[in-house]
Image: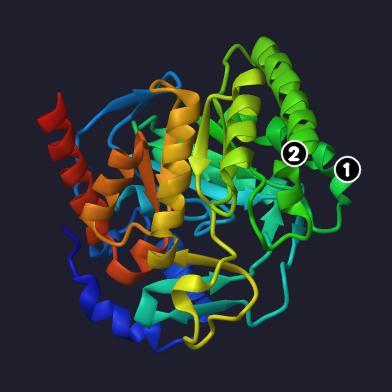
Amino acid sequence: MSLIPYALVRPFLFNMDPEAAHDFTMNTLSRGQNTPLQAVWSNETVNDPVTLAGLTFPNRVGMAAGLDKNARCIDALAAMGFGFVEVGTVTPKGQPGNPKPRMFRIPAAKALVNRLGFNNDGLDAFIANVKQSTVRRQGKPMLLGLNIGKNAATAIEDATSDYLTCLEGVYPHADYVTVNISSPNTKNLRALQSDEALDSLLGAIAERREALAATQGRRVPIFVKIAPDLDDAQVEVIAATLRRHGMDGVIATNTTISREAVKGMPHAEEAGGLSGAPAFEASNRVIRLLRAALGKDFPIIGVGGIMRAEDAVAKIQAGADVVQIYSGLIYAGPELVVQSARALRALGTQTR
């Protein structure tokens, strides 16, 4: 387990501005990975392999995209015991994101609001960082997902071009690629989840993926990340579109724009996506709808509101195959990774 319990570290971090704490943490992880300092946050990697989309996940707990947008801390995150780590979202060109302040904690609800807006250093820097990962160079079993998006300055009607640029760039380095069409923090991005727009985007991505597979000799799975703020009919349409274009899986879900669970709390009305405990039920609702629409064999990665091991179990019971955490890492620390992985291994043992 981690050398220093997170309960001792959290008060220090929570006394800082949320984005300053995030930057401090990422800088510490980046500088400390593959050094003796890594013992501070290292965990065992629970052995609980599962095969999805032709990939073998060492265990069922992953790091969600958004924490490590520039792929600087892959090795540090791997040391926490994740079976898979997803980094990004990356855009073709670097961009600063939305004006600060743009991250807010709601501790009473174990929640976060962010409106970062895909702040990142761009595709070239992202790929260079991925190449630097010791975990990747040594061929260790942890899987790596690379999450792609569009630049804020790119008109929504031209979004496909950005996604194809990113897909070509990350394809040789990814175990799987995630198409992020569900962040609420890039203007009009969620419009890509609508019927015609989604059909057009995924059709272009599927076509380009086949061309890349032919030239590079490997077919990289593609997942699509969707929002929790969808009605039943929208989920049905998305499920059918994923199937039609041969997508390999779906990630459910991104942050929510709903504020029902935090109404009246400080920062509740800040613009942006709400994550953490309040997103749990909304995410599970979409997972259940997707599982019903897609059948038992279509891969679903469940994310949203996993704050304790029991929440990870509930995600699997709702229909997910594997899970990801983000806000739970901020509130509960790296211990949550191994606790959740053990709980899911026990669950699998009971049901096998």
Q: Of the residues under marks 2 and 1, which one precedes in the sequence? A: 1
- Circle on res. 163: 2
Q: Is residue 113 above or below residue 241?
A: below
The spot of residue 262 in percent (x, y) is 46, 77
The spot of residue 75 in percent (x, y) is 40, 49
Name the amino acid, label 2. Tyr
The spot of residue 35 in percent (x, y) is 32, 58
**What residue sits 62% from the left and 77% below the top?**
102
Mark 2 falls on what kind of element? helix
**Which residue does the numbered mark 1 point to in the structure image?**
158
- Distance between the alpha carbons at the discs numbered 2 and 1: 9 Å
Mark 1 falls on what kind of element? helix
Answer left or right for 310 relative to 56: left
**What residue sits 29% from the left and 60% below the top?**
38
- Circle on res. 199: none
Q: Do the residues under discs 2 and 1 have CB atoms within 8 angstroms?
A: no
